[in-house]
């Protein structure tokens, strides 16, 4: 439920010398600055859910966000709370300051990074890494995240307890394989997944890698990405965010939501 807290940042990003930015980026930056208002984003989700990387991105951008806690995997009572805002009864849901509604975590992250280019959270359109950025954002969403529809309620695909166990086992193996494939194909020699600047792809992988089969398995399957997510875990600008929305509790690398 809505806990009444405003989890937005209290401060705005430091001023940027737009004379040092490409002309088209400066225009985007000026436009985004003009429309910044007191109207916050509203983000529906739950701690540790797909809303968490979206909230992290808004934190780095410096935009205010009101959080409404909803956990649809807990049953119809929670799902029904979403009907009016999202007929699919899924989270995350992001209500923009304009009132427009967005669903799909990858779409939110891509939109936010493009909407606020001054935050540097995505390769620009003419950046050589742009294609790979879009590729892997889509891969995490379609090949990994989508499997949690079955993992959250394996009865959706299986009629017996034995069948549910098979669903959980096979989806865990598929997730591990996807992490291995991604790890093997990402560029090497950078601090983050696509370069030396943190992007929304790093935020996305950092959160999703904490879901089942958990981080310890992820570290074994994806040693290159393991270095990156540990770096994002320790990002000073996100310490308050992680504490509030996805805390590092005891045994968090093998336990948790």
Image: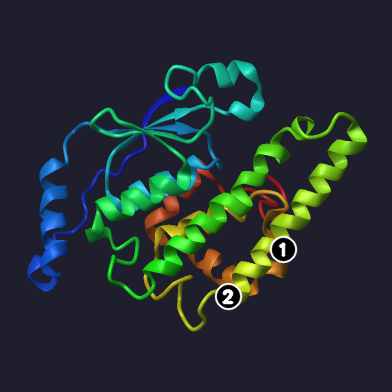
The 10 Å Cα crowd at callout 1, few under 14, some 14 to 19, many 20 or more, is: some
Local SS, label 1 = helix
* Mark 1, residue position: 177
Q: Earlier in the sequence, mark 1 or mark 2?
A: 1
In the image as oriented, which residue stretches furthest toward the bottom? 189
Residue 17 seen in this snapshot: no
* Mark 2, residue position: 185
The residue closer to the viewer here, 49 or 183, is 183
In the image as oriented, which residue stretches furthest toward the left? 19
For image coordinates 65% across by 49% down, the residue present is: 211
x then y, percent, for residue 206: 54, 57
The span from disc 1 to disc 2 (Cα, nearest Å) is 13 Å
Q: Are discs 1 and 2 less than 8 Å apart at CB?
A: no
x then y, percent, for residue 37: 16, 36
The residue closer to the viewer here, 149 or 63, is 149
Residue 96 seen in this snapshot: yes
x then y, percent, for residue 221: 71, 68
Q: How many marks?
A: 2
- The answer to whether 9 is drawn above or below residue 87 in the figure is below
Residue 85 falls in image quadrant: top left
For image coordinates 48% across by 70% down, the residue present is: 193
Residue 7 falls in image quadrant: top left
Q: Quadrant of the C terminus?
A: top right
């Amino acid at each position: 439920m809505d806990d009444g807290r405003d989890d937005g940042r209290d401060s705005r990003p430091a001023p940027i010398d737009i004379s040092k930015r490409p002309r088209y980026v400066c225009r985007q930056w000026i436009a985004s600055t003009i429309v910044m208002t007191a109207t916050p984003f509203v983000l529906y989700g739950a701690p540790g859910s797909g809303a968490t990387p979206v909230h992290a991105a808004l934190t780095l951008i410096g935009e205010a966000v009101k959080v409404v806690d909803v956990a649809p995997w807990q049953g119809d009572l929670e799902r029904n709370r979403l009907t009016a805002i999202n007929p699919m009864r899924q989270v995350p849901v992001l209500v923009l300051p304009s009132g427009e509604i967005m669903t799909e975590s990858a779409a939110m992250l891509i939109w936010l990074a493009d909407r606020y280019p001054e935050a540097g959270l995505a390769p620009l359109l003419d950046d050589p890494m742009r294609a790979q950025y879009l590729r892997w954002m889509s891969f995490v969403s379609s090949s990994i995240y989508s499997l949690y529809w079955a993992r959250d309620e394996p009865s959706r695909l299986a009629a017996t307890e034995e069948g549910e166990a098979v669903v959980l086992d096979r989806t865990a193996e598929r997730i591990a394989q996807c992490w291995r494939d991604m790890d093997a194909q990402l560029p090497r020699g950078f601090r983050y997944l696509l370069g030396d600047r943190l992007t929304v792809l790093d935020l996305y992988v950092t959160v999703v890698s904490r879901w089942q089969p958990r981080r310890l398995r992820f570290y074994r399957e994806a040693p290159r990405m393991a270095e990156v997510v540990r770096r994002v875990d320790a990002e000073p600008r996100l310490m308050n965010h992680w504490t509030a929305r996805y805390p590092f509790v005891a045994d968090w690398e093998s336990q948790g939501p």
